[in-house]
Each structure stands twice: as structure tokens, then as C-alpha cells.
């Protein structure tokens, strides 16, 4: 919807002057635009407005100035939703690829954003510096259309909350602002996400090797207003391909404080629940995962039926379909296998010796871990075939099983809130891994893998069914549920195969000597207060128990036989 304006100048002169072109030297229109006229914005270039007359008298179309000296000639007409967003034209930007040693020098530069073209601050110190500060925020918010040109940010303060909120993809801050003109659509409490400092490996992995920052930037600029559920209002977002710096500013979601209340009514937002902590949720988790899975299906259906941004296929391309199961694919190459086996040997020592007191005995047994190592060697060799099966190969329309939806909808990325009927709804945060991929991966690894063992085992089929049903209900194709169930169990194979690679990250957070006195990974504060230790130790516990209790390796062997594959490569 176009921005509307009202003419407030020209009260003593019979209205304001209109010219036929943008240039101040272009021809003057024969009529003046009447005071009180309502006009629709066609284009805004600096202080010059190209309009179309809606009510009042004067030329049907023309160019006017926003101000005469310091006096406003027109003012934006407010709507409850605020001004329309000013989206830049979509363009594909290829990120720079460079070596780790270049990271510090590149990240030290302030360069224009790839999409809005504005140079932006990329650290707390810069954002609070008067050189940037409220003046830059004002320009940025006007640039995106979050704020009208007659307004400005007048005060700001920041609080670093990186260690207080979950997730490790960037530095996180609360930003409090004041405006020259308070408006109901302007939030004074905002959230800011900035890149890691260019030291250590975190920044290089997130910004270059994994490339998480660009999908989040693209989502917040172009898809934010298209998705069929609550997401934070975006105030500014951009990224630079050469420096890899980015900035994201959104409204701050006002989560309830954990533990303060157990009953919620219409309009309430529940607490920000922690991953691997289902006990925090009112029913222990099931209804929360079910609600999240339904919205995964809903977004996937919106993508399939063309209800997202017109350029979404260019932003997030669909892969080529896999028509049939490939045969005679090679297994893991010798070098990668040797590296993976070395990682598992470290994992084996960690589970059976270093942290033996921290986990249940059934997953710390040396004999069982020896057996697991052999099983992983076999499962890893069929990783490509598992991916093809999960991608719908052999089905009449394989890409029905490939979707664009949130790929990391753990409970800590959910906004659980109550609608007018007091039904539990789910909004979404953190779009860093957004891409087209197997629907079953988004459900199982992206969402359900955060559930505690008993919840996962009892409900995983119902979670998958909820996502599949919602996908079809909202316009997507009907999927074969039996195939999705098999694929869901094969996802656990990949999950278990990838655990060992994260042992070093756990030991970086909690040292070897400390593990001797850890008796429960979910209770010990040394583990729970360190992001990598908490995330991966929790997964070591959950994934291995799920693998055991669901007899996943037997199901993997049955799948091999059904696909006419050999028992091993």
C-alpha cells in the first residue's frame, strides 16, 4: 500500500506549487495543490515527491517539495500499521570467498550495504558513537520505511545480552530509543544483532563458511511481511559481501518472564523457552512442538502456492529434482573416513572416560560405543542415498518433498503467543539457515531434535503428521506419510553420525578436568551456561538414547534391504 500524504502548506497562497518534473527548474503546473488535499506517493527522491491526487483540488499528478526552507508543506498520513515499507529491488549478490587470515582486515571496514546502499555500523561501539548514533538510526529507519521522513530518533541506549539469550550466530543487544514524534507503530524497545568480533573461529565459520548472515538478511528485507505468522518488525537490515559485516534491527519481542505465570490469555506472549528444557513448558513440550510443526507446513505451503515474495525462487532456488534413487554411489572417501574415525575416537574417550559420570550408563559403555563406531562407518557411507530418499526420489513429483520453510525452528526460535480465541500460535525468529531442502529435515533436525527423549519417542510420528497435514491443508501437495515416517527415522542416522565432530567444541567450553565432577549435563551450571557445551552435550545424551530406544540401526538395515542396497559398501 502506497504512502499517503496531506498538504499542510500554502494556507495563505491558495495551495502549494506543483512542477511537472522532479527538477526545480521544470515547468510550473497551471494550478496549485490545495491545502488539505490528500495525495498518494508515486516516488520520493530526496526532498521531492511525485504524487497522485486522491482528494482536494489541483493537478492530478506532479512533483512537489516536502519543505519550503524549514516549513513543512506536506506531512505523511499515519495508518495503524505505519508507513508502507520501502523494499529495495531484489538482486543476487555473490558473497566473497576468502581465507581465514583475511577476516580481521576485511571485517574492520565500514562499507555500503549490498541492498540498501547505506554504510552501516557493525559494532556496539560504532553504533553508540555520535558519528553514527541517532543520526544514522534516523536515516536507516526512514530508508526502510519503518519511520516517516518527518520524524527522527532523538535518544538511544544499548545493553549487551549476548550471554543471556540462546544461539551463537552473532552478538545480541537490546536497544532503547526515543522519537521526536511518538507513533503507535513505532517500538521504543528494539533488538539488534551484530556479527561476532573478527577474532577466533566463530566469525569465520558463521559469516564465511556457513554463510548464515545473508539468508537472515534476505528474509528480513523481503519476506518478513509475507509469511503467515508473527515475526518481529524489521527496522533496518543489511550486509556487505566483502567485509561480511551485517546489522539487523527489529522490534524487541516482549516475552513473559520464565516462571512468573502458568496461565496465559488472549494477546499474551509466553516465555522464551530454552532448547533441551521441555520441563519449562506447561505440558512438557508436546503441544508446543505440534504448533511449531503445523507452522512449518503452513510456510512450506505458502512457498509452493506462490504466496511469498515474487522473487522468492531467485532468492532461495529449488534444487533439481532427483527422479530415481542413484545406484552404485561411492561411500565416504578414505581421507574423510579417517578424519571422521579420529573424531569418533575422541568422542569415545569423552563418553566412556572423561564424562562417564555425566551420562546414562547405557550410552557410555565402551563395548556399545565400539559397536556404534562400526554402525556409523556403514551409515555414513549411505548419507547421499538417505538424502535422496528424503528428497522424494522415485516419487511422481520428487520436489513435493523439498520445501522452503524455517530450518532451525527449535523452541528458542519460537514466539509462542495466544490469539484472540486464546489458541496457542507460533511466530518465528532467526532465519540464518533458510534454504530449500527436504521437508523432513526441517521437521526432525530443525525442530523436533530439541525435544527431550521421552517426548521425542512418544510423539515424533505425530509431529511429522501435523506438519504434513498442515502442508496439504494450506495448499501444498499430499505427501506419502509412510515414506515420511521412514525418512524421519533415517534423519536420526545422520544426526548420530555427526555428533563426534563436536567433541572439541564441548571441551573448549568445559575442560577435561571439570568433567569428572559433572553428574548430569542438564543440571550442572558449568555445562548449562556455556552455549556449545550445553547444545552438544544435550544432543550427545538425547540422540544416543533415541538411537538406542527406537532401534534406529535395525530400521536403517531394513531400509537398505527395501532399497535393494548391499548391507555395506
Image: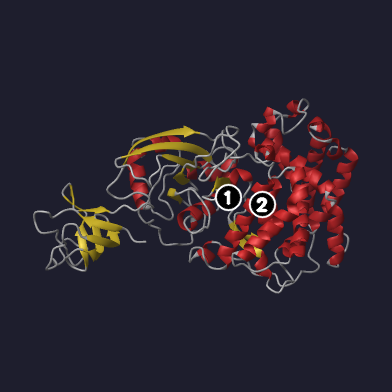
Question: Which color scheme does this rendered protein use?
Answer: secondary structure
The image shows residue 544 at horizontal and vertical percentages of 80, 44
Asked whether 541 or 79 is in front, the reply is 79
Asked whether 256 or 405 is in front, the reply is 256
The image shows residue 315 at horizontal and vertical percentages of 52, 62
Secondary structure at badge 1 equals: loop
Q: Is residue 231 visible?
A: yes
Query: Which residue has dot 2 on it?
Result: 290
Q: Are marks 1 and 2 in contact (CB under 8 Å)?
A: no
Looking at the image, the residue that sits furthest to the bottom is 396
Q: Is residue 491 visible?
A: no
User: Mark 1 or mark 2: which comes first in sequence?
Assistant: 2
Quadrant for the C terminus, please: bottom right
Which residue appears at 73% of the width and 44% of the height? 501
Which residue appears at 67% of the width and 68% of the height? 478
Numbered circle sitting on residue 176:
none
Q: Is 33 rendered above or below residue 336?
A: below
Which residue appears at 86% of the width and 58% of the height? 557
Task: Describe residue 361's horizontal placement relative to residue 506 as left or right.
Answer: right
Residue depth check, mark 1 versus mark 2: number of the one nearer the observer: 1
Asked whether 299 or 210 is in front, the reply is 299
Quadrant for the N terminus, please: bottom left
Q: Is 339 rendered above or below residue 398?
A: above
Amino acid at each position: 500500500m502506497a504512502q499517503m500524504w496531506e498538504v499542510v502548506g500554502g494556507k495563505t497562497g491558495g495551495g502549494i506549487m506543483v512542477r511537472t518534473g522532479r527538477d526545480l527548474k521544470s515547468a510550473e503546473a497551471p494550478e496549485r495543490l490545495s491545502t488539505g488535499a490528500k495525495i498518494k506517493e508515486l516516488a520520493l527522491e530526496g526532498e521531492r515527491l511525485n504524487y497522485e491526487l486522491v482528494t482536494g483540488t489541483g493537478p492530478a499528478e506532479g512533483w512537489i517539495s516536502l519543505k519550503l526552507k524549514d516549513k513543512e508543506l506536506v506531512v505523511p498520513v499515519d495508518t495503524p500499521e505505519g508507513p508502507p515499507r520501502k523494499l529495495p529491488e531484489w538482486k543476487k549478490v555473490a558473497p566473497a570467498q576468502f581465507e581465514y587470515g583475511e577476516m580481521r582486515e576485511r571485517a574492520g571496514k565500514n562499507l555500503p550495504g549490498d541492498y540498501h546502499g547505506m554504510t552501516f555500523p557493525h559494532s556496539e561501539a560504532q553504533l553508540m558513537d555520535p558519528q553514527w548514533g541517532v543520526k544514522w538510526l534516523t536515516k536507516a529507519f526512514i530508508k526502510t520505511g519503518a519511520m516517516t521522513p518527518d520524524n527522527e530518533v532523538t535518544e538511544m541506549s544499548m545493553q549487551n545480552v549476548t550471554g543471556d539469550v540462546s544461539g551463537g550466530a552473532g552478538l545480541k543487544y537490546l536497544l532503547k530509543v526515543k522519537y521526536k514524534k511518538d507513533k503507535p507503530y513505532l517500538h521504543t524497545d528494539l533488538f539488534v544483532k551484530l556479527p561476532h568480533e573478527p577474532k577466533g573461529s566463530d566469525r569465520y565459520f558463521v559469516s564465511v563458511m556457513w554463510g548464515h548472515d545473508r539468508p537472515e538478511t534476505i528474509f528480513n528485507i523481503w519476506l518478513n511481511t509475507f509469511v503467515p505468522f508473527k515475526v518481529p518488525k524489521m527496522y533496518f537490515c543489511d550486509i556487505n559481501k566483502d567485509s561480511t559485516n551485517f546489522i539487523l534491527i527489529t522490534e524487541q519481542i516482549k516475552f513473559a518472564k520464565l516462571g512468573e505465570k502458568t496461565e496465559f490469555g488472549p494477546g499474551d506472549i509466553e516465555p522464551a523457552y530454552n532448547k533441551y528444557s521441555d520441563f519449562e513448558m506447561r505440558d512438557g513440550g508436546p503441544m508446543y512442538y505440534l504448533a511449531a510443526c503445523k507452522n512449518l507446513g503452513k510456510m512450506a505451503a505458502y512457498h509452493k502456492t506462490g504466496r511469498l515474495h515474487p522473487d522468492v525462487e531467485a532468492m532461495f532456488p529449488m534444487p533439481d529434482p532427483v527422479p530415481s534413487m542413484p545406484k552404485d554411489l561411492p561411500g565416504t572417501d578414505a581421507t574423510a573416513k579417517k578424519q571422521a574415525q579420529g573424531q569418533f575416537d575422541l568422542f569415545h574417550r569423552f563418553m566412556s572416560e572423561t564424562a562417564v559420570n555425566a551420562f546414562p550408563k547405557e550410552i557410555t559403555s565402551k563395548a556399545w560405543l565400539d559397536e556404534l563406531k562400526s554402525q556409523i562407518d556403514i551409515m555414513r557411507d549411505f548419507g547421499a542415498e538417505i538424502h535422496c530418499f528424503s528428497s522424494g526420489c522415485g516419487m511422481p513429483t520428487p520436489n513435493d518433498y523439498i520445501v522452503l520453510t524455517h530450518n532451525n525452528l527449535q523452541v528458542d526460535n519460537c514466539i509462542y503467543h495466544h490469539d484472540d480465541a486464546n489458541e496457542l500460535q507460533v511466530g518465528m525468529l532467526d532465519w540464518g539457515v533458510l534454504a530449500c531442502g527436504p521437508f523432513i529435515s526441517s521437521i526432525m533436525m530443525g525442530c523436533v531434535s530439541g525435544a527431550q527423549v521421552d517426548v521425542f519417542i512418544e510423539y515424533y510420528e505425530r509431529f511429522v503428521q501435523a506438519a504434513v497435514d498442515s502442508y496439504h491443508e494450506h495448499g501444498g501437495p499430499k505427501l506419502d506419510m509412510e515414506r515420511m515416517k521412514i525418512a524421519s527415522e533415517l534423519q536420526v542416522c545422520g544426526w548420530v553420525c555427526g555428533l563426534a565432530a563436536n567433541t572439541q567444541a564441548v571441551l573448549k567450553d568445559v575442560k577435561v578436568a571439570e568433567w569428572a565432577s559433572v553428574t548430569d549435563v542438564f543440571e550442572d551450571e558449568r555445562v548449562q551456561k556455556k552455549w556449545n557445551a550445553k547444545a552438544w552435550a544435550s544432543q550427545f545424551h538425547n540422540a544416543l538414547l533415541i538411537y538406542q530406544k527406537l532401534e534406529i540401526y535395525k530400521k536403517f538395515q531394513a531400509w537398505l534391504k527395501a532399497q535393494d542396497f548391499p548391507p555395506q559398501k
